[in-house]
Image (tube, rainbow, N blue to C red):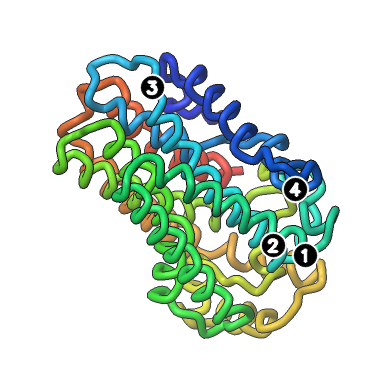
Amino acid sequence: MVQPNPLLLLPTLADDLARVEDQLRLSVQAEDRFLTEVASHLIKAGGKRVRPAFCVASAATRLAAMAPAPADVVSGAVSVELVHLGSLYHDDVMDDALTRRTVESVNARWGNLKAILAGDYLLARASEIAASLGTEVAGLLASTIARLCEGQILELQHTFNAQRNEEGYLASIDGKTASLLGTACRIGGIVGGLPRPVIDRLTQFGHSYGMAFQIVDDILDVVATDEELGKPSGHDLVEGVYTLPVIRVLAAGGSDADRLGDLLGGPLEPPALADARAIVRGSREVETALDTARAYAGQAAAALTDVTESEAGGALVAAADHLLETVRVAAER
């Protein structure tokens, strides 16, 4: 059984995230009640708030022990989460998703046009909050939004492409996932007033963690059950998004590659999806993909060797180990 994420056990963090939650709700209050309702839909649905937690913990690495986060740090955490939420609104439109976080998706409930505009509104509110924290934070968040778009475009260009290569996959997750986690840590360091070398190491930690995080998420989509994920498993294969373990099975050649290649390249019916997942799960490439995630998690831990004596720094490093434990348990079932 996987233990709770050690990051979420930090003293004062639960209270800090409750403050983030309050500010998230306030940040999307618009003059128009309908816009407020649509923009707050996924906020009310909840979430792990991983990125705000990274922002708050990063700012606290200057302290031996955790203390309540300053108001500016909480605002930085809110801006990062709003970018994440805005990207989810847009992702669900592209995926024609019906649910998100166990509730009806915004696009399913109100339509694509309203979902896109509400996502834009969340990004605008994030930018407004970032601007209140200074030009560096504002510029950083703007460039991160651009990288999110670049990463997503790279993925869309290779939908249902069984020739997608590993280099393209890594470039895509660098933009769509790792960039925002790196930015969450960097904003925490900037707003927290940390020395520049420490800010740079925190950024590297967040980026490397983000690479590991996405690879693990992609592995779980293949090996875990619907119940374990809390959403339909095999979603990437259905959507034609071929991730690291799939790419490696295809690149390895042999009968497994031939069988899998015959299944991929277009929409999958449930029996074909089950066959494709079985081929990938039965290969050694789930383990080699996990090795790649381990390598990125190791890079994350190595980036914070100078701050592990702080309570927050130690918890950040432990969070990387927890990420790998999650997939190890799922893969053994």
Q: Position of residue 13 (x, y in %)?
A: 45, 21
Q: Earlier in the sequence, mark 4 or mark 2?
A: 4
Q: Mark 1 points at which residue?
A: 112
Q: Mark 2 points at which residue?
A: 116
Mark 3 to mark 1 CA distance (whole Å): 37 Å
Q: Which of marks 3 and 1 is nearer the N terminus?
A: 3
Residue type (three-letter) at the residue carrying disc 2: Ile
Residue at 74% across, 53% down: 232
Judged from the image, the secondary structure of the residue bearing numbered disc 2 is helix
Q: Give residue 295's mark.
A: none
Mark 3 to mark 4 CA distance (whole Å): 30 Å
Residue at 60% across, 26% down: 22
Q: Mark 4 points at which residue?
A: 35
Q: Earlier in the sequence, mark 3 or mark 4?
A: 4
Judged from the image, the secondary structure of the residue bearing numbered disc 4 is helix
Figure check: 149 above or below 102: below
Judged from the image, the secondary structure of the residue bearing numbered disc 3 is loop
* Callout 2 touching callout 1 (CB < 8 Å): yes
Residue type (three-letter) at the residue carrying disc 4: Leu
Q: Where is residue 216 in the image (x, y as percent from the top left)?
A: 49, 51
Q: Tell whether 130 sits left or right of 330.
A: left
Residue at 23% across, 17% down: 64
Figure check: 85 above or below 154: above
Neighbour class for label 2 at 10 Å: few (<14), some, many (≥20)?
Answer: many
